[in-house]
């Protein structure tokens, strides 16, 4: 708790609330869409997928495990962000999903690119905010 106080010491005005707001928005987004993957309470988008996007999506469904894994990961990361626990770990767990989401929307289905881009921006804002937590894993170790 002391580190959080020190971290916000020099930040004034609305900017000091940005990381918390982004964490809440991203957490709620991931929590709801992860839960929707299991309960299907949101209507499916009415977008005609390209041939490549359709083939990719079908392969995820046919694998039998990939979509449940993606939804469970979204749900777990969303919950961790909402309860403000293990946030740096949650961001690391989410990173491969964001990379793949961006690649999917850049190369196969452009309609979801703004949402994927916003998720990437949220991730980067939070990674920057928690950058001290990553210092030890980003430091070269001597042999």
Image: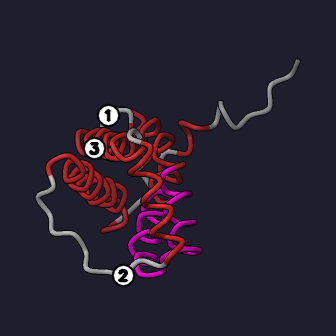
**Of discs 3 and 2, which sits in the foreground?**
2
Relative to 39, is 138 above or below?
above
What residue is shown at x 26% (from left), y 58% (from top)?
29
Identify the element where label 2 is drawn: loop
Q: Quadrant of the N terminus?
A: top left
- Which region of the structure is painted magenta? 97-123
Q: Return the x and y of residue 143 as percentages of the image width and height.
A: 88, 18
Q: Return the x and y of residue 125 as percentages of the image width and height.
A: 47, 60
| Between 110 and 15, the one nearer to me in the picture | 110
Mark 3 neighbour density, 10 Å: few (under 14) some (14–19) many (20 or more): many
Q: CA distance from mark 2 to mark 1?
A: 38 Å
Q: Earlier in the sequence, mark 3 or mark 1?
A: 3
Report the residue marked by disc 1.
Answer: 85
Residue 48: assigned label: 2
Residue 75: assigned label: 3
What residue is shown at x 32% (from left), y 80% (from top)?
47
């Amino acid at each position: 708790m002391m580190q959080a106080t020190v971290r916000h010491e020099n930040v004034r005005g609305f900017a000091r609330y940005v990381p918390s707001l982004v964490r809440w928005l991203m957490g709620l987004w991931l929590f709801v869409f992860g839960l929707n993957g299991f309960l299907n309470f949101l209507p499916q988008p009415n977008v005609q997928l390209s041939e490549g996007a359709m083939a990719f999506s079908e392969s995820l469904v046919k694998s039998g495990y990939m979509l449940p894994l993606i939804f469970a990961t979204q749900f777990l990361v969303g919950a961790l962000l909402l309860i403000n626990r293990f946030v740096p770990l949650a961001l690391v767990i989410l990173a491969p999903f964001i990379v793949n989401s961006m690649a999917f929307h850049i190369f196969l289905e452009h309609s979801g690119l703004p949402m994927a881009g916003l998720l990437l921006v949220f991730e980067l804002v939070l990674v920057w905010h928690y950058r001290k937590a990553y210092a030890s894993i980003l430091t070269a170790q001597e042999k």
